[in-house]
Amino acid sequence: MKLPIIRQFYQTQTPENLEKTLEVLEAFCEFRGATEEDLNVVGELITNICGALEVHNNVKNGLSEKDALNGFAQKVLGSIDK
C-alpha cells in the first residue's frame, strides 16, 4: 500500500475506471503463467486501487480527502498488526 499512489488514483480516476481496472487485474491473477513476482506487483496495484475506491466512497459520504486517506491507511495497518 502506497498512500501517494492511492491519492493519485483517487484524484485522477473515476470509480468506474478503477473498478474496470480492478476486474482486469483480478482476471490476470487467474492466468496460469503468472509468476510470483507478477502476482506480487498485481496484488500491490489491487490494494492501491481498492484504497482509492474506498476513499472515493468515504469522500462521497462526507469525509475529507485527508481523513479518508488516513482512515484507509489505519485500516490496512490495523489488519497487519493482528
Image (spheres, rainbow, N blue to C red):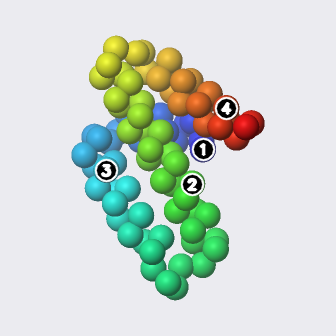
Type of amino acid under label 4: Gly
Q: Which residue is mark 2?
A: 44
Please give left or right for residue 27 compared with residue 67 in the image.
Answer: left
| Neighbour tally class for label 2: few under 14, some 14-19, many 20 plus, Cα within 10 Å | few
Q: Position of residue 45 (x, y in %)?
A: 51, 54
Q: CA distance from mark 2 to mark 4?
A: 17 Å
| Neighbour tally class for label 1: few under 14, some 14-19, many 20 plus, Cα within 10 Å | some
Residue shown at the point (35%, 65%) measured from the top left: 24
Q: Which residue is mark 3?
A: 19
The quarter in which the C terminus is drawn is top right
In primary-sequence order, the first of circles 2 and 3 is: 3
Residue shown at the point (38%, 39%) measured from the top left: 53
Q: Residue furthest bottom?
A: 33
Type of amino acid under label 3: Glu
Q: Residue furthest right?
A: 81
- Determine whether 12 is above or below 70 in the image: below
Please give left or right for residue 69 compared with residue 53 in the image.
Answer: right
Cβ atoms at labels 1 and 2 below 8 Å apart: yes
Type of amino acid under label 1: Met
In primary-sequence order, the first of circles 1 and 2 is: 1
User: Considering depth in this image, is 20 or 8 the residue closer to the camera?
Assistant: 20
Mark toward the viewer: 1 or 4: 4
Cβ atoms at labels 4 and 3 below 8 Å apart: no
In primary-sequence order, the first of circles 3 and 1 is: 1
Cβ atoms at labels 2 and 4 below 8 Å apart: no
Q: CA distance from mark 2 to mark 3?
A: 15 Å
